[in-house]
């Protein structure tokens, strides 16, 4: 090649430098934006431990004055019609009615009362614009965060309310076992969106000079409102659903609302006339340890500890301790149940349940003996009994339970948006099974209404 045909060395140097700069710039752009712009909303669902919050809105400033609750406005005695659904503005997916839950697809049609925010998201510090009752749920970043730590374990009220709101949100793809209906005549059940566990955890102490207890005030207002509703009076509240998962929630109103269907942790602090397995739902606690992915779950020979017990106070090493153990003990405390059992399931440690009075979630469709070991309390205290029992379970039997644990663990996971057969979806299906019994009872009582003497 002649000297004239060769490109100038300085020009070649500039071209190479410019190419390298553009290559580095494009790589940085991909690194910066690749984790955000195309992710589905479910990515923002966090399962956190310790004292963190469940926060499905990563970039929204949290109201630091969470205890500043709006003035308790009087509830209207007239039945309200639920909103048609939140705005689709800011949705993760383009609005499309094909993604929303249709009534004919749902197994349960739910009418949700439009209670003022002070009964639900207002307790989280949320303040809507103007007369807004509900936050927008199309975009997880607009949803108020729920407190973390042990408060999170009783957050079922939060997840169920979100799920109903999402059923009318065009851009949210979710499990469609339950759908919110606007017309009360179409409803199978009437949902009362009171965050009763959060109210107890955060607002059960006297406030101000008057020593008013907000938790009690809210319950009194709720009772007055519900008992005045025609929908309640029609069947005496039997077709109403109230979440009271914390053992001390609804303490001042549970007897007055006892005809309703409750979502509970157990029946330990309830008289049988107020709560029982015939009419009420047992829901799983929200576990507070990190879930172990199936491909990271230790097998029999990789678990060096025979049995592990996680005490009442959460410890940072509990996750590692359970994940390294073949068996984990669930022992009854001041109540028959606790979130300990669901922490155990999340780590795929085979539960050993020593709680004679325990009621378990979804036991009408789940056989817990497939993945749990049950021991009577009277046997567990016998010297050497428990150790001999657990050592007698060989690798093959343990592995069968371990595999089954991995299969059923998703039933106890709370997600937003909900997924088929996750905890939210399983609760709605359990409600549907109870509704059938309620409907049978109500229909039988109407047999002779025409022949009853009139006064």
Image (cartoon, grey):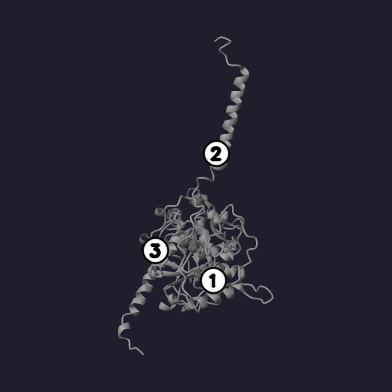
Q: Name the residue under label 3.
A: 365
Residue sticking out furthest to the top: 2
Q: Mark 2 points at which residue?
A: 30
| Numbered disc in front, either 2 or 3 | 2
Q: In percent of the image, x 50 and y 48: which residue is there? A: 296
Residues at marks 2 and 3, CA–CA distance in whole angstroms? 46 Å
Say whether disc 2 or disc 3 marks the residue closer to the N-terminus: 2
Q: Mark 1 points at which residue?
A: 247
* Residue nearest the viewer, comparing 343 with 446: 446
Spot occupied by residue 243 in the image (x, y as percentages of width and height): 50, 69
Q: Quadrant of residue 406?
A: bottom left
Q: In which quarter of the image is residue 185?
A: bottom left
| Numbered disc in front, either 1 or 2 | 2
* Residue nearest the viewer, comparing 3 with 331: 3
Residue 200 in view in this figure: yes
Q: In this view, does 361 lie to the left or right of 288?
A: left
Residue sticking out furthest to the bottom: 455
């Amino acid at each position: 090649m002649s000297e004239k045909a060769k490109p100038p060395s300085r020009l070649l140097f500039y071209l190479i430098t410019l190419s390298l700069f553009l290559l580095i710039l494009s790589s940085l752009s991909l690194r910066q934006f690749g984790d955000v712009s195309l992710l589905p909303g479910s990515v923002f669902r966090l399962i956190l431990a310790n004292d963190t919050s469940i926060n499905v809105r990563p970039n929204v400033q949290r109201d630091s004055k969470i205890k500043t609750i709006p003035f308790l406005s009087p509830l209207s005695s007239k039945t309200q019609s639920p909103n048609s659904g939140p705005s689709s503005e800011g949705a993760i997916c383009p609005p499309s009615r094909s993604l929303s839950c249709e009534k004919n697809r749902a197994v349960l049609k739910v009418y949700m009362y439009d209670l003022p925010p002070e009964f639900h998201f207002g307790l989280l510090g949320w303040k809507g614009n103007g007369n807004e009752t509900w936050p927008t749920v199309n975009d997880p970043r607009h949803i108020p965060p729920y407190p973390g730590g042990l408060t999170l374990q009783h957050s079922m009220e939060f997840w169920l309310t979100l799920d109903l709101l999402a059923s009318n949100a065009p851009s949210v793809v979710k499990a469609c076992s339950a759908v919110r209906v606007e017309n009360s005549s179409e409803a199978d059940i009437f949902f009362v969106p009171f965050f009763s566990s959060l109210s107890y955890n955060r607002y059960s102490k006297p406030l101000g000079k008057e020593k008013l207890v907000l938790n009690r005030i809210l319950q009194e207002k709720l009772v007055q409102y519900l008992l005045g509703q025609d929908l309640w009076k029609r069947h005496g509240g039997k077709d109403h659903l109230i979440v009271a998962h914390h053992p001390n929630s609804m303490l001042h109103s549970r007897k007055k609302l006892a005809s309703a269907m409750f979502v509970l942790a157990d029946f330990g602090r309830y008289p049988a006339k107020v709560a029982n397995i015939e009419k009420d739902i047992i829901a799983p606690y929200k576990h507070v340890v990190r879930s172990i992915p199936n491909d990271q779950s230790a097998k029999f020979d990789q678990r060096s500890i025979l049995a592990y017990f996680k005490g009442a106070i959460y410890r940072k090493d509990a996750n590692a301790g359970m994940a390294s153990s073949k068996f984990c003990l669930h022992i009854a405390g001041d109540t028959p149940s606790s979130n300990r059992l669901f922490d155990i399931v999340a780590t795929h440690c085979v539960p050993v349940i020593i709680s004679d009075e325990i009621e378990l979630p979804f036991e009408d469709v789940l056989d817990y003996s497939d993945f749990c070991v049950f021991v009577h309390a009277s046997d567990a205290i016998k010297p050497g009994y428990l150790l001999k029992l657990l050592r007698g379970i060989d690798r093959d039997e343990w592995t069968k339970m371990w595999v089954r644990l991995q299969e059923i663990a998703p039933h106890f996971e709370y997600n937003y948006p909900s997924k088929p057969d996750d905890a939210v979806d399983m609760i709605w299906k359990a409600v549907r099974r109870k509704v059938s019994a309620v409907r049978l009872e109500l229909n039988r009582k109407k047999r002779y209404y025409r022949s009853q003497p009139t006064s």
